[in-house]
Amino acid sequence: MKYIKILFFLIAIQISAQQGGMWIPSLLEGMNETEMQNLGSKMTAKDIWDVNSASLKDAIIHFNGGCTGEIISERGLILTNHHCGYGAIQSHSSVEHDYLKDGFWAMSEAEELPNPGMYVTFIKRIDDVSKEVFKGVTESMTAKEKQSKIDKNIVIVKKNAVKENWQEVKVRAFYKGNQYLLFVLENYTDIRMVGAPPTSIGKFGSDTDNWMWPRHTGDFSLFRIYADKDNRPAKYSKDNVPFKPKHFLPISLDGVAEEDFTLVFGFPGRTDEYLPAVAIEQTVKKINPAKINIRENYLKIVDEYMRADDKIKIQYASKYAGIANYWKKWIGENQGIEKSNAIANKQRLEVKFQNKVKNNSEYDHLLQDFDRLYKELDDVARARAYWTEVAYRNVELLRATVRLYQFEQKVTANPSSFESERDKLIKASKGNYKNYNAKVDRDVFEKLIEIYGTKIPATYLSDKLKNVNYTDLTNTIYTKSKLTNAEDFKSLLEGNQQEVLSKLNTDPAYVLGKNLSNDFFNKINPKFQAINLQIQDVQKVYMKALMETFPEERFFPDANSTLRVTYGKVKGYYPKDGVYYKPVSHLKGVMEKYKPGDYEFDVDQKLIDLYNAKDFGVYGENGKMPVNFLGTNHTTGGNSGSPAIDAHGNLIGLNFDRVWEGTMSDLNYDPEICRNIMVDARYILFIIDKYAGNKRLINEMKLVHPKK
Ligand code: ARG
Ligand code: GLU
């Protein structure tokens, strides 16, 4: 009965016309459908999601588990971001064929390149399994007992699910564990690389422009799904044929104008929209600043080396981009939380909430519980952030010690796994050392270990870091350790288990790293997880309480890497007083940013020629070539590569980023300044057709004129 009540709320509350929200595509009928139509959509909920007939959903894929992609031809052609295909493009590249630098264009299907390990996932069906998952879960159970009962039920639910033998099932929690949905999926594993523009187009502006508007990036790449002769998933084979989708997205040549309806369909990874004020305060005041400070130091050191040395630049480009991406995001997030008064607004909401529940013994203590638990979490959460960033993310030598630590644990517990675990380590180390420079890492270590040693809460400070001189420590480690180069590392792992472990335990880097890992795996993380489990239990009840207490508000479930729909419109914004950002950028802006020879802002001669000749084909608009545009769609990491779809179901753009002022949308969506950034579909077509001259790809697409 209780869950039926909750379900009722989930459906009834989606009322207000304000935008934001990531909705479950199988539950759009009713409020979402009305809201979309009010924004200008001509589609019904069934046009978007229909289990029995072809609908938009049949053109959407989870791309390699992290990004989104969409099918844009009847031959299984996939469109996704350049930064989503980056790893694949890089893996096919060599000095002779540098596809990152020059781009890659298969001129026939025979030239399309296989990508071992790559996969894409279609969602075939979504079922509500809350009742089965909560069976036998009672209020008198502890948080841990409840979770273990739920986990057992999920195993049964998955086993009983109706599906074809080539399909898989997954169960995921929604609304902080108040609802459970089962997903039936199909994974295709023969995915071939079809096309990618050069980095100077696909990553134009690089980290300087990342998370920013105005933007001018052609962040797209093309792949193709291959299937067996029955159109089913199959391992790579020469005999496989292009996949025939149930539906693919036609592409609109009519472009976008401010206020046009936009729907983004994809796999957002993670949001936290229902945290209490204390949690946001902790993130913004304690956790983010710690992480930002560490990364800032990393970036400064590595940037200097990269600028001075081309080899280091190549070795560190991808690592640098990864560290810089979230460093910049957190800074924007902090500013946005402040600017949108998120904490004060949450506090006001909490006062209202507390007033309404003061006579409800199930709910009246929740905010107090949060206060107590987040206070308890404070030190350990900071310790965890320092450990993760220093020992795991930024200092490569220390990350290597974490792997070695896990290796020692495993082989000690299970000596028969020694050979295979050692092989795994050696194999993984090859790729790592290829892109490793001990001088760079040494400087990063020296700076970061001092931050770690002086900033981590005292209870969590490793014995090995008490009263040390950081420079001496650094010198000892980077002159004596065998972890600083591939050959020494290999020699360290030679011998039988006993020999290897005893060598390992005299290596100065390992000795320190082991100590840090012991701190983490035996002290920091268990404590963090124990408190976190209690927080999740409170958060689950709080979510339910919020929905019951404010039935007129709209609540969407936090992102959890499942398929979602978010709708909005093309719209500019005011980043600050007196400044308005228009929602569309043009190729002219690429030329304005052009810095010959610069690794972020160089422009290819061919593109310059096309620009000068205004040779935009049917893709330009009034003599201009649109490049990127903004929308009010509520997106997050994982929405990269998601299609932007018009009122009729045609592709108009490709999502790839958000604006800096709005990156706090993961914690607090504000329709005034939260914007997603998309590549205009016409720019993609222009690059494929006019720049790359790849007509065969254009010919297999369906180009339409919905506005005419
Ligand atoms: N900010 C975008 C996202 O979160 C794009 C990241 C890739 N680009 C980059 N310059 N690092 O993933
Ligand atoms: N670039 C992000 C991604 O890779 C999407 C942008 C965002 O976080 O909004 O998923």
Image (cartoon, rainbow, N blue to C red):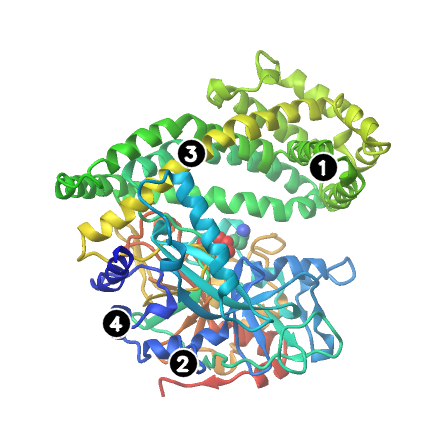
The percent position of residue 161, horizontal first and vertical second, equals 49, 66
Residue 139 vs residue 395, the one in the foreground = 139
Q: List the residue tagged with mark 1.
A: 437
- For marks 1 and 4, the one nearer the N-term is 4
Mark 4 vs mark 2: in front: 4
Mark 3 vs mark 2: in front: 3
Q: Is residue 86 left or right of residue 416?
A: left
Q: Is residue 156 left or right of residue 672?
A: right
Observer able to see residue 641: no
For label 1, the SS is loop
Disc 3 crowd rating (10 Å Cα; few below 14, some 14-19, many 20+) is many
- For marks 2 and 1, the one nearer the N-term is 2
Q: Look at label 2 and name its amino acid.
A: Asp
Between the C-alphas of marks 4 and 2, the distance is: 30 Å
Number of the label disc, if any, that sits on residue 30: 4
Q: Look at label 4 and name its amino acid.
A: Gly
Q: List the residue tagged with mark 3.
A: 287
Q: On the rendered image, what quadrant is the N terminus found in?
A: bottom left
Q: List the residue tagged with mark 2.
A: 254
The percent position of residue 570, horizontal first and vertical second, equals 33, 67
Residue 191, placed above or below residue 65: below
Residue 362, placed above or below residue 459: below
Disc 1 crowd rating (10 Å Cα; few below 14, some 14-19, many 20+) is some
Asked if the residue under mark 2 is in contact with the one under mark 3, i.e. CB atoms within 8 Å, the reply is no
- For marks 3 and 4, the one nearer the N-term is 4
Place residue 477 in its image quadrant. Answer: top right
The percent position of residue 239, horizontal first and vertical second, equals 74, 79
For label 4, the SS is loop
Q: Residue at x 42, y 45 (%)?
A: 147
Residue behind label 4 places its C-beta within 8 angstroms of ligand 2: no
